[in-house]
Amino acid sequence: MTALIRFALSQRLMMCLLVVLLAGSGYYAFKYIPIDAFPEVSPTQVKIIVKANGMTPEEVETRITAPIEVELLGIPHQTMLRSLAKYAITDITLDFEEGTDIYWARQQVAERLNGMWNNLPPGVQGGIAPMTTPLGEMFMFAIEGGDLSLMERRTLLDWVLRPALRTVPGVADVNALGGLVRSFEVIPNNMRMASRNIDMNQLMTALQTNNRNDGAGRLTEGEEALIVRAEGRIKTEQDVRAIVIAQNNGQPIRVDDVAEVRIGALTRYGAVSKDGLGEAVTGVILSLRGANARQTVEQIEAKLADMQATLPEGVKVNVFYNRGVLVGKAVHTVTQALLEAIVLVVILLILFLGDLRAALTVALALPMAALFTFILMKAFGMSANLMSLGGLAIAIGMLVDGAVVVVENIITQLADHEKAERLPRLHMIYRATREVAAPVTSGILIIIIVFLPLLTLQGLEGKLFGPVAMTIVFALSGSLILSLTVIPVLASFLLTHVSHEEPWLPRQLQRLYEPLLVWCMDNSKKIFITAGGLLALTLLVFTQIGSTFMPTMDEGDIIVQLEKLPSITLQDSVKLDMQVQKNILDHIPEVETVVSRVGTDELGLDPMGLNETDTFLVLKPKEEWQAADKEELIESIRRIMSHTPGIAFGFTQPIEMRVSEMLTGTRGDVAIKLFGTDLDVLNHKGEEIEALLRNIEGASDVFMRKNEGMQFLQLNIDRQAAGRFGLDADSIENMLRAQIEGVQLGIVQEGIKRTPLLLRGDSNTANFANLQITLPGGDHVPITALAKIQQVEGVVSIGREKGQRFVVIRSNVDGRDLVGFVDEARKLVSEKVELPIGYRVEFGGQFENQQRAAARLSLVIPASLGLIFLLLFTTFGSVRQAVLVLANIPMAMIGGVFALWVSGEYLSVPASVGFIALLGIAVLNGVVMVTYFNQLCAGGMEISRAVIVGSARRLRPVLMTASIAAFGLIPLLFASGPGSEIQRPLAIVVTGGLVSSTFLTLILLPILYQLFGQGREQTV
C-alpha cells in the first residue's frame, strides 16, 4: 500500500496520463454498453408449441402433451416442466438451471422432440418457439388507414412488414395478431357430389395432385441446352375450378361441377380490437434473448420509417407499446438521481472543507469511479439498466468516503505550520495519505465484502440485485484505487494554498460536539440505558413491520385481464371487448388508447381461450391526469368495469404479467396451486379456496380460471353401423374435420405470398344433423345414421406441472403485507378445505420468491458479519476492538427500522439490501475512529485524553462520510419515475440508519473505547 502511494506521487505525470486513458475508455464503454429497463430476469427457458386443429383439451393432453412430457423428462439440468392443453393447442415450457447454455438446451429439446414427433397424431404443426424470452415483447403496433380490409391489412403485415422487420438485428420474430389470413377455399356440395358419384377422397386427391411445378431435365438443341420445366401449379381461383376429378362416359367432372371455389380465411383462434371502433391488425415484435433493447428499438423505428414510403397510400403503422419509452424513463430516473446526488455531495464537501479546490479534488473521485465502473460493466457483459445504474446511485455517497478521509487528512497536515516549514510538501501529502491508508482500505473492503453475499441470491431477486451488488463492488474498488493514487496526485496540484483555520461549519459543529461528548462521558450510565431502551423499542417496532417480496414497479401502462363465459363465440367476445373499450374511453379521461387481444396469437406463445382477453390501456402523460395517482386511476377503472355484466377482471402491467407467468406459470402476487388427478374435483375444491380468499382482508382481483362450461357437440360413433356401411372411425373423423374445420391440402404460390388451399364444408348447428357422409361406393348417408349426437359440457384447459394436473387460484394483495396475507390464507385453507387423498396445495407467486429470498438472506447476513469481524480483527489485531466496532451495527439498525416503520414501507428484498449496505457504512466510521484512538494511545497519550482529542479530530471526516452517504440517497427518496419504487425502501433504510449509527460513532463509541477499548496492561 505504502509503495503504491509512493509510486503515484513520484510518477505524477504518468498518473495524469492514466486518468486521461481512464476517461477515454470509460466514455467508450458508456457509449456502447447495452441499455435496457431491467436486467435479464428470465431463466434459460425453452417453449414448445404444438397446434392440432379441432382437437379438444382432453384429446390434446392425452395424445400430444403427455407423450411429449414423458419424452422430455430426464433432460439434464431441468428445473421445471409446465404445460397447458387447450382447444387445438398445447404450450409446453421447460426451465433449466441458471447458467445452462440456451443453445445446448434447445438442442436437447429438439433431439427429444424429433425422436417422437412421428408418434403424434397426423396433421399436427409446431415445434420449438422462437428464441425470445417472456419479457421479449418490446414493440407493438397496429396497421391503420388506407381503407384496407382486415384481410388486406393482415396480408400486408404477413408478407411485407414481418419479413422486413425480422432482418433487424436483435429481433427474434414478429407475432401477428388479428385480421383474416387469406386462403383459397373449396366448399363441396354434397348433393352434386352424390349425383356424380364423387367421394371426398377423390376430391382431395385431385386438389393435391394438380398443384406442382417441376423440372424434367435438359434437352440439347444444336449448340444450346434447353431446361425443361413443367408448370402445373395453381395460380388463380379459375385454375382450381378447372381441375378434373374424374370422367364419366368421356365427360370430365371438374371441381367447379361439385364444389364452390372462393377466397376465404383460415379459422380464427383470436382477434384484436381497438378503441371500441372495430377489429384491428397488430404486430408484436419479439426480441432475441440478450439483445440490446434500446438499440433494437431504435433500429425497429428506423426500419418502419424507411418502409413507410413503400406502404399503400394512407396506411400508417401506429405504435401503441414501445419498450424503449420505459427504458428511457427508467434510465432517466436513475441518471437524474445520480446528477442530483453529485450536486448535493459537492455542496456538502464545500461546506465541510471550506475550500473549493479541496471539494473539487474529492468530487473528481465521483466521475472517475463511475467511468471505472462502466469499463468493468462492459468487460463483464452487463447492461446499463434500472438496477445496475441504481447500484451506482446507491454507492454515490460511499464513493467519496476514501477520498474525503485522504483529502481531509492532507489539509490538516498541510495546515500544520511547524511541519509545513520543516518538510517538503509532497512528503507531507505522502505521510498524510499513508497515515489513513489502512483504515480507508479496510473500511472500503468491509463495504465491498458486505455486498458480495448479494451475489448468492437466487431466482428473480438474485437477477435483480446481482447487478446492484456488482456495480457497487466495481465502483467501490475503483474509488479505493483512486483514493490512494490519483487523489493524492490531484491534491498535490490543486491544494497549493491551505487555510490554517477550520471552516465555519466544522467550527460550529466542534463547538457543539465537545461539551456534549464530555457530558456523555460523565453520564455514561444514562447513555447506555437510553441506547438499550431504543434497541428494545426497535425490536418491538420491527415485529410490527410486514414483509413483502418486492414493491410493484410502475411501468406506465395498465393491462386489464378479462374472462368471460367459456362457451362464448369469438364474435361475441370481440363485441364485449369493444363495449369495455368504449366504457373506459368514455369515463376515464386518463386513457388515450385501448387495445384488446382475445384468444391465441399466431405463434401460440400466449395460448388464451376465446373467452380470455388482455386489454392494454395506453395512458396519457401524468400532467394530464385527473386522478391523483395510479392506484386511484385503477380504482376508477375498477368501478367502470363492475358495470359490465358477464366478465371477471384483474389488473396487471406488461412486464409484471410476463414475469409472474415466467416464474410460476401464472399471474398474481399469490398463486395457490391445487394438484390432483380428477378435473371435476380440482374445479370444485378450487372454487372453495377462491371463496375463502375473497373474504381475507387485503385480497383483490381474486381469480380462478373457469375450467368448465365449454360446450361440446359430442358424436359417439356406432362402430357396428359404421362397419355395415364400410367405414371406420378414422375415416368418419377425417370427413368431419374436412366439413367443419377444413383440411389444408397445400399452398397456392402468389409471388412471395403462400396462400393456403383449404377443403372445407359449409356446416352449422342448424343443418349438422343432416350432414351427408360419402360411402366407399359413392352413396351418402346422414351422420345420424353413423353416430349419436349429444351436447355436453367440458373443460376449457388442462394445466400440468411436472406431469401432474393442477388448477391455480390467484390473488393480488392490496394495503397489506404479503407474508401476513399468505399466513392467514394457509391457515384458512388447511382448516376449511378438506382435500381427498392424493391432492395437495402449494403457495407460489411473489410469495414463493419472498420465502426463498428471506431464507437466503438469513444465511447471507450472518456470513457477512463473520467476514466483517475477520477483516476488523486483521486490521486491529484485537478481538476486543473488532467487537467494539461491530457494536455500531445494532445502533445503525435502530434508525433503519424506525425509518421503514414511519414511511409505511414493508420489509422487502430492497429494504433488506439497505440493511446490508448499512452494515458496511456503519462499520467504516467506527474503523476510522478506533484507528485514530489507537494512534494517539500508541503515541503515549492517556486513554481518557486520547478519546476526547481523537473524537474531536475525527468529527469532520465522520460527519462528512455519513452525511454525504445520506445526502447521496436523498434524490432516490423523492424520485418518481419507473423503478424508483424498488430503490426507495433501500434509500429509506440507509438514510435512517446513518442518523442513528453516526450518533453511536460520535457518542457511544468513545465511551465504549474508554471502558473496553484497551486491555488492562495497555491501559497501565
Image (cartoon, rainbow, N blue to C red):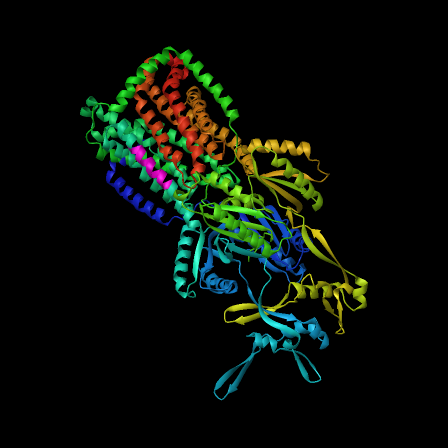
Check the image and name the residue furthest to the bottom.
222
Task: Give the main secondary structure, helix, strand or loop, of the magenta stretch.
Answer: helix
Task: Count the labels in the image.
Answer: 0
Span of residues in magenta: 334-346
Quarter of the C terminus within the rendering: top left
Q: Nearer the viewer, residue 435 or 64?
A: 64
**What is the quadrant of residue 666 in the picture?**
top right
Q: Percent from the top left, x then y, of residue 452?
A: 45, 35
Q: Percent from the top left, x then y, of residue 414?
A: 22, 26
Does 202 sit above or below residue 786? below
Q: Can I make out residue 978 in this image? A: yes
Check the image and name the residue furthest to the left.
421
In the drawing, does residue 849 fall left or right of residue 1005? right
In the drawing, does residue 295 fall left or right of residue 663? left
Whether the magenta-drawn stretch holds residue 671 is answered as: no
**What is the quadrant of residue 213 in the picture?**
bottom right
Q: Percent from the top left, x then y, of residue 117?
A: 64, 59
Q: Can I make out residue 939 in this image? A: no
Does 988 sit above or below residue 203? above
Q: Nearer the viewer, residue 749 or 917?
A: 749
Whether the magenta-drawn stretch holds residue 335 is answered as: yes
Q: Nearer the viewer, residue 89 or 520?
A: 89
- Residue drawn at x 70%, y 40% as measured from the top left: 839
Q: Nearer the viewer, residue 982 or 486?
A: 982
Quarter of the N terminus within the rendering: top left
Q: Percent from the top left, x then y, of residue 150?
A: 51, 62
Does 969 sit above or below residue 155? above
